[in-house]
Amino acid sequence: MPGSAAGARPPGRRIGLLGGSFNPAHEGHRHISLLALKRLGLQEVWWLVSPQNPLKPRAGMAAFDERLASAKAAAGDRRLRVSDIERRLGSCYSVDTVVRLKQRFPRHRLVWIVGADNLPTLAEWRRWPALFRALPVAVIDRWPYSRYASVVKPAKRFARQRMAERRATGLARSKPPAWMVIHGPLHPASATALRAASGAAG
């Protein structure tokens, strides 16, 4: 996990970074994390719970500690490590978090993991080109959003840097910008649906 304990680990570990609101965390987050571990040859995936996603309304957003607790409950695997690092850094933008993590863990090979459902809004992220240039990016398939993988602005901007999926285990060692789409078994869970079900039950 990001912090003093992680800093004491052997250098050169392959770490996936999965940022999000986790409002709440669910089996879908776990599913794509385990898929990334397997396909990308990662040793850990860090879940970076965001204090507040700038692109999402505060209305309906659970308290940070509640979302952090839901992530810890959902992870269920020692390789999935839940972190409050963004709150401690005072960061709510992915690119700022990545810059700080690279400074803090210069020997780790970091890979940004993002669900394909984020593709339509990826160009709205703060300094998104800098994010692609900072570390390799793995887009995890999520129907029907993967169909945007070739047409969204970031995909066009970095079309020449897209890697073939068969080279997935080499992504963490690739010099950015480098990205690819990872396909695998799909999982239907979504935080939106869980919140709707919770509201209906309430």
Image (cartoon, helix red, strand yellow):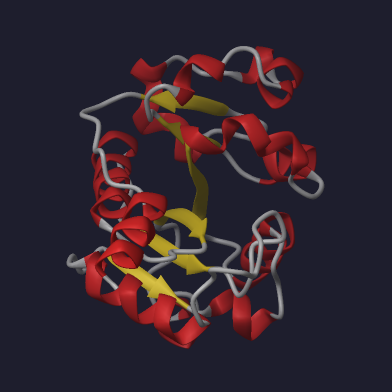
Toward the viewer: 35 or 118?
Answer: 118
Identify which residue is drawn at 52% across, 52% down: 110
Task: Determine whether 186 is above or below 1 in the image.
Answer: above
Percent position of residue 160, x then y: 67, 12
Q: Quadrant of the N terminus?
A: bottom left
Compared across the picture, whether 136 is left or right of 83 comes to right
Toward the viewer: 171 or 202?
Answer: 202
Numbered marks: total: 0
Task: Determine whether 171 is above or below 22 in the image.
Answer: above
Q: Residue furthest right?
A: 127
Q: Quadrant of residue 175?
A: top right
Q: Quadrant of residue 105?
A: bottom right
Compared across the picture, whether 156 is left or right of 139 comes to right
Compared across the picture, whether 138 is left or right of 186 comes to right
Identify which residue is drawn at 51% across, 63% down: 21
Percent position of residue 4, x then y: 48, 87
Percent position of residue 104, x then y: 62, 73
Q: Quadrant of the C terminus?
A: bottom left
Toward the viewer: 7 or 113?
Answer: 113
Identify which residue is drawn at 67% across, 14% down: 159
Identify which residue is drawn at 65% across, 70% down: 58
Percent position of residue 112, x then y: 53, 47
